[in-house]
Image (cartoon, rainbow, N blue to C red):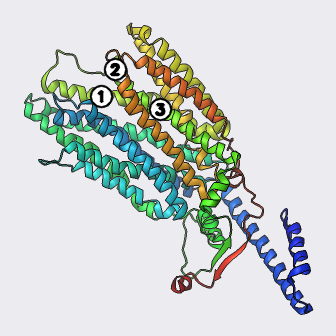
Amino acid sequence: MIFPPGYLRRRTSLLDELRMDGLPASTATKKSVLDGTEKHLTVVVQLNAQRRAALADVDNAPWSRFHLKILVVTGIGFFTDSYDIFAINIAATMLGYVYGKDQVLNTNQDLGVKVATPVGTVFGQLLFGWLADVLGRKRMYGIELMIIILGSFGQAVAGEAHTVDILAVVILWRFVMGVGIGGDYPLSTVIPSEFASTRHRGMLITAVGAAQGWGAFTGALVALIITTAYKDSLLRDDPTNLVLIDTMWRLLIGFGCVPGAIALYFRLTIPETPRFTMDIERNVRQASDDVDSFLKHGTFVVDPDAVVQRVAAPRATRRDFRRYFGQWKNLKVLIGTCWSWFAIDIAFYGLGLNTAIILDAIGFGSPSSSVTGTLAVYQNLRNICIGNLILTVAGQIPGAYLCVFTIDRIGRKPIQAGGFAVLAALFVTMGFAYERLNASHTGARVFVLLYCLCNFFSNFGPNSTVGVTPGEAFPTRYRATAHGISAASGKLGAVVAQVGFARLKDIGGPNQFVKHILEIFAFFMLSGVASTMLIPETKGISLEDLSREDQEEFIEGMAQETPHAADAVTAS
């Protein structure tokens, strides 16, 4: 048997202590106690070896159908999240035609329906990140999707009364939906991270995140289909036809329930990750069986009569949390992931403030003043849909997939730092040359190109990588919690961008402060480069090594043993 480092030293130390102080005078008793100690140390060695073997099987596993299943099931979550978040940009225009004064929502109403979801997301990320580490990834995975479905359905059937404003109801349901979306962030990252092999882990996580681009694309596509379907009714030039738009936005928002409902069954039947079973439930034997099952057959089986073998290992407590993050080597990583996510979301969501300018430049802005009546309504909605489709395809989707196929070759840190640096240069150019570029037709086209490049390098850069590192760089017992804290920091940046900068952009006149906002974005991108230096490169390194904890003697012994799981439940 090959003993791990520290075993012989620990064994000698324990035996010496027993010989000196802890043994009775009887030689038989001495031998019995010494034999028991020897047996305990042997069990510890065997359990640690079994844990390392199971983890090695996961880390070295080739790509399989099971990994593809994880990608699809978790990716649908991010797809649904993105659809629900970005569809409101089009739905808000529809709501304005029906419930706004002069057919447009005022500043506070528009801000309310758009910022409610990010605010709810902050709470969901913190809550479900913690619950996933306490109760399990599998147990929480599905609950947050139910909340998303409920929130989407609630918006679609929202009504009003004498004392109830429909926009207030929509805002409430969007907050509820945001809580569910927030829960999806840590779970849909940690689950593929803990199932993936070391070689393909970055690709799997970023491929899940890349589904966001398709969610935004589908939101605009569904809106275009709905607008086209109601074209004849809208073009009858009857002002009462605007009531039809009340149906249109409900269909657009309600469609967000469909992918979630499809994915719900698969989420409820997905296995618990072996790392949670092993390190938090402390059941090494069950985790080893699970690894064998999903690697060989792509399934898992829970035997109610299986032996429950609990081990003594580090547990998540307040004291342990303070001890772990009280060390600068660990705290600096959390600070780096939090600020990097905050910085990129400032810009990613702030880019939405300039969408109207970009759509005008590419010919899909508001219709000319000569177009009136319901024809103007139809053309405006159609232009918004097509314009958003173009902008998504032009930057977000290709950037995300370039990151998918290069992240395990180039590494997380170079892509993130390089992306921040390029974005800083682009924002400086767009900000200081803003007036000159938009003074001519050719300059406006150049500005559109720079805007698309910002979307491209945001996704082939920090917008993809900020969600990867916090799902890798922390121990299993704090992985989802740390990811939730990091993601919540990002959504706080989104709230700042939507609330703060939305009110700044019109200082001095319509869109007159936009150039300065772009310059502010450049500052945050430079700060993102600095925060990236705080995080480690995680490419090709096992999750256990990235936790910065001793893995050789991670298991200290047996916590409890019961013959059968059913007996344990009955006894309790």
Q: In this figure, which residue is indicated by the disc labeled 2?
A: 506
Q: What is the crowding at mark 3: few (fewer than 14 residues within 10 Å), some, or many (at least 20)?
A: many
Q: Earlier in the sequence, mark 3 or mark 2?
A: 3
Picture coordinates of residue 177, whole percent (x, y)? 35, 50
Q: Residue at x 43, y 51 (%)?
A: 124
Measure the alpha-carbon separation of dots 1 and 2. Answer: 21 Å
Question: Which circle, 1 or 3, is nearer the viewer?
Answer: 3
The image quarter in which residue 227 lies: top left
Q: Residue at x 62, y 28 (%)?
A: 418
What amino acid type is highlighted by mark number 3?
Answer: Ile
Horizontal side of 142 relative to 336 (left or right) equals left
Secondary structure under the numbered disc 3 in the rendered image: helix
Secondary structure under the numbered disc 1 in the rendered image: helix
Picture coordinates of residue 362, whole percent (x, y)? 36, 19
What amino acid type is highlighted by mark number 1?
Answer: Ile
Q: In this figure, which residue is indicated by the disc labeled 3?
A: 346
Q: Is residue 109 above or below residue 42?
A: above
Picture coordinates of residue 57, whole percent (x, y)? 69, 60
Secondary structure under the numbered disc 2 in the rendered image: loop
Q: In this figure, which residue is indicated by the disc labeled 1?
A: 384
